[in-house]
Image (cartoon, rainbow, N blue to C red):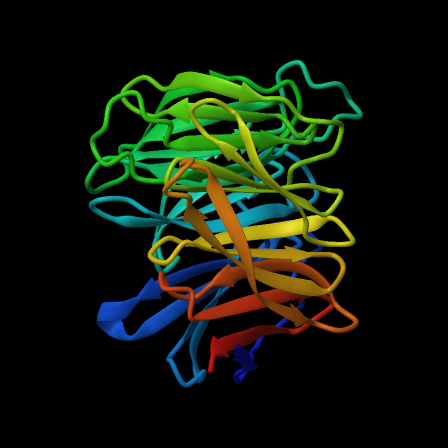
Amino acid sequence: MFRRERSLPLRGSAAALCNNLSVLQMPARNLTHFGVVHGPSAQLLSAAPEGVPLAQRKLHAKEGAGVSPPLITQVHWCVLPFRVLLVLTSHRGIQMYESDGSVMVYWHALDSGDASPVQAVFARGIASSGHFICVGTWSGRVLVFDIPAKGPNIVLSEELAGHQTSVTDIATEPAQGQDCVADMVTADDSGLLCVWRSGPEFKLMTQIPGFGVPCPSVQLWHGAVAAGYGDGQVRLYEASTGTLHVQISAHARAICALDLAPEVGKLLSAAEDTFVHIWKLSRSPESGHTEVEHCHGECVPDTQVCGARFCDPSGSSFAVTGYDLAEILRFSSV
């Protein structure tokens, strides 16, 4: 069971975008950072466990070429082995900051290339794998940036081609030193999933076909892909083979966010039906297949939910954002 905790006030509501919440826990300082985007800016908040907001910072999208300010599409903290970077994506490019947003260390402008005049150009979908940060784009390409241990000498090392439509989300998990292990999955607007092995050269391991419904959010857990779709379904696949293990009619409307508590195998799903559900994942000892058990459902009434994340690796608390909701709602286990 979860109970409502003290919410965190925002200076404006969250934009109606999928995955519009990022959470970074800082156990050493007993702080949790939250990031939310709306229009041309991103709000960063720091809060102590009792819910008192300690600091707020506003970041704006770098202008680039153009008259109107670019809209930010996502904010996400990337935890690398040696540093933490805050990544912002927008209709003009990709910005990388030190974790507190104080210093921009890198700016990558998007090349509209062969885009038609009516086609939107943007980046969306952010994840880190080893010393790489991967960012999805409107064209279906995934940009791979090689991140140094310190300083701004970030290099675009590779562009991954596996998608024909816009990338929606990227998820990774540590490969734990095993060879030929699928440790990254990318999703797109057609519902196609591409499973990769990261490394100095990323390798496409398998593709899991879509079925005409977008896949706004994905997660990886112990070699299983959890994918949330625009029809409210959550599907669990074997990452290495693409085999479907579980199909759940989890929500009545489009899913807008998935998150994972890796320590305990809890999966969080949030959707436009105002519900947030928590599921327990496990591996069957007999078949090796992934199994699912429903743990908790929380209704956020009269709210178009657009972001939800666990606030700790054990899944004992989570936070929710909604369109036209000027606060971050927080829940913790009883």
Tell me the quarter of the picture where residue 68 sits: top right
Residue 101: image x %, image y %? 39, 57
Question: Residue at image x 68%, y 52%?
Answer: 250
Q: Along the line of sight, which residue is nearer the eye, 309 or 110?
A: 309
Image check: 138 left or right of 204? right
Whether 324 is drawn above or below 159: the answer is: below
Residue 316: horizontal and vertical position, in percent? 42, 70
The picture places residue 48, in percent across and down from the top left corner, at: 37, 80
Q: Is residue 129 above or below residue 71?
A: above
Residue 245 quadrant = top right
Q: Position of residue 159 (x, y in %)?
A: 45, 19
Q: Residue sitting at 66 percent across and 51 percent down?
A: 256
**Residue at 75 percent of width and 73 percent of height:** 301
Residue in front for this viewpoint, 43 or 152? 43
- From what the image shows, is residue 251 above or below residue 243? below
70 or 54: nearer the eye?
Answer: 54
Give left or right: position of 2 versus 131: right
